[in-house]
Image (tube, rainbow, N blue to C red):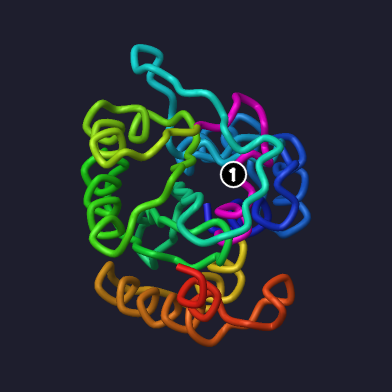
Amino acid sequence: MRLIDEEYTRPPFFGARRLSEWLGRQDAPAGRERVGRLMGLLGLEAIYPKKRLSLENKEHPKYPYLLRGLCIDRSDQVWCSDITYIRLRGGFVYLTAIMDWYSRCVLSWELSNTMDTEFCVSTLDRALERSRPEIFNTDQGSQYTSSVFTDRLSQSGIRISMDGRGRCFDNIMIERLWRSVKYEEVYLKDYSSVHECRESLRAYFTFYNQERRHQSLDRRTPHEVYRSVA
């Protein structure tokens, strides 16, 4: 699972067949069916390169994607959120984060042993204590389409936007965040417990927001950009 997660994050268009071939070259042979099963456990979907950790509930209402052609030019105009897998020495946990699209500032985050709705809602509540966006964008996962989550947004006067199915770049900013988190933090560590993971991620997100400068932000930090125009 560790090898699959690392290799998938590098070329996310690899499916079970290619990952099985790659594992064989790493002296960790695994058949295509086993790799497919483990990808399902990790919430990884071949290709496109959308990670489907938050799986769809067909009974929940869906909302249209509102960002197509939209000029995002200020903080708190659009927030986005997603869920990703974080490995531990003896297992794994799930990480969710809420990020301001324009500044890339991580506004809140949380870990959970399960992909329940509550840890996404509590993360949203903490972010809303800080400010509120005009639009909130997510995928169509059941955590985000649940009434408890969408009601929080609607009651706060926030417009709801959801990625189109199979459209890998609709939530591209949070996907870029996951890549940074994995390569700059997770893959360099060997967390022995959830507590150790949480404290290490806390330090990383402080660094990411307040010290990590982005070329796309004119070499400013996300916190500087968010604070300057929020």
| Count of labels in the image | 1
Q: Position of residue 207 (x, y in %)?
A: 48, 84
Q: Quadrant of residue 197?
A: bottom left
> Which amino acid lies under the numbered mark 1 shown in the image of this protein?
Asn
Q: Which residues are magenta?
A: 162-178
Q: Position of residue 155 (x, y in %)?
A: 23, 36
Q: Is residue 117 left or right of residue 16?
A: left
**Which quadrant, please, contains the C terminus?**
bottom left
Q: Residue at x 44, y 61 (%)?
A: 87
Q: Is residue 167 left or right of residue 82?
A: right
168 magenta-colored: yes
Nearest the eye: 149 or 57 = 149
Nearest the eye: 211 or 131 = 131
Q: Quadrant of residue 117?
A: top left
Q: Position of residue 208 (x, y in %)?
A: 51, 78
Q: Is residue 32 left or right of residue 52?
A: right
| Disc 1 target residue | 171
Q: Residue at x 43, y 33 (%)?
A: 160
Label 1: few (<14), some (14–19) or many (≥20) C-alpha neighbours in 10 Å: many
Q: Residue at x 63, y 82 (%)?
A: 220
152 magenta-colored: no
Q: Residue at x 35, y 53 (%)?
A: 132
Q: Is residue 92 left or right of residue 12?
A: left
